[in-house]
Amino acid sequence: MDSMTSTAAAPAGPAAQASPSQTLSRGIRALEILAAAPGPLTIAELADAMGVHRSVAYRILRTLEDHSLLVRDDAGKVQPGPGLAVLARGVSRNLQSAALPELTYLANSLDMTAFIAVWDHHDCITLVTVEPRHSGATVAQHPGTRHPINAGAPGIAIQSAFTGAEWDRLDTGVAYRQEAGEARRLGYSASHDEVIAGVSSLAAPIKVPGGRPAALAVVYIRSAHDPEAVGAALAGSAARIQEQLA
């Protein structure tokens, strides 16, 4: 009789360890949640947001903490760490370098927070931001902040780098906003109450050679400046940034 051998099946269910790819995905998700949070989170809050058990979140956080990607305060709450800033310096390095002088000029001359937003899948993500030096109240716009690309002036400005037909051919799954056509004609876009209640934004597109377009934007609650003049200033700054990138 032929002998038969059997191979034990790998354990399944909750006892099985998460695959390396799942662990990596969870770590990235933890960083995304922390970057979007208005303040530090407890481990329990982060675990709930991730949809995992607290012990799983704790193991992931320990690894991220070892690489300075997050830190814990005296109360044990977690927040983004300095290691993220080191990584961010390499993201769109040329765009950041070209944009920083213009961002600084716009922020201080307009008394508004100025920033660069880049296109990521269905979202706009804030890449770099500058707040005015001498201003009593400004709108914070932290790097890593994201919102849907079809909401707000930065997303409209990015869409305005394309015609409606060009956008449709990209097959992004996101509708081309009617305002993008008007922004294409004016050179800048405007929005109010779309991303944050009571906040207005103006933005101009930046065409990045060999890459996706970005947006140069400002956010404010109230301003004595004429929106058309601010829009023209943004368009001028965007053009100078494009010259630096060419």
Image (tube, helix red, strand yellow):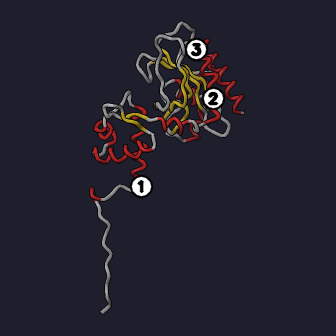
Which of disc 3 and disc 2 is earlier in sequence?
3
Q: Is residue 67 left or right of residue 244?
A: left
Q: Is residue 32 left or right of residue 244?
A: left
Where disc 3 sits, the SS reads helix
The answer to whether residue 182 shows anywhere in this view is no
Q: Nearer the viewer, mark 1 or mark 2?
A: 1
Residue 20 is labelled as 1
Q: Which quadrant holds the C terminus?
A: top right
Q: Which quadrant holds the N terminus?
A: bottom left
Residue 206 is labelled as 2
Query: Is disc 2 surrounded by few (<14), some (14 to 19) or many (20+) residues within 10 Å?
Result: many
> As shown in the figure, which amino acid type bears the numbered disc 3?
Asn
Considering every residue shown, the one lying at the far bottom of the view is 1
Where disc 1 sits, the SS reads helix
Where disc 2 sits, the SS reads strand
| Mark 2 → mark 3, Cα distance in angstroms | 21 Å
The answer to whether residue 108 shows anywhere in this view is yes
Kindly identify the residue that appears in the image at 30 percent across and 45 percent down.
52
Q: Position of residue 231 (x, y in %)?
A: 60, 16
Which of disc 2 and disc 1 is earlier in sequence?
1
Kindly identify the residue that appears in the image at 42 percent across and 22 percent down.
196
Which residue is nearer to you in this view: 107 or 79?
Answer: 79
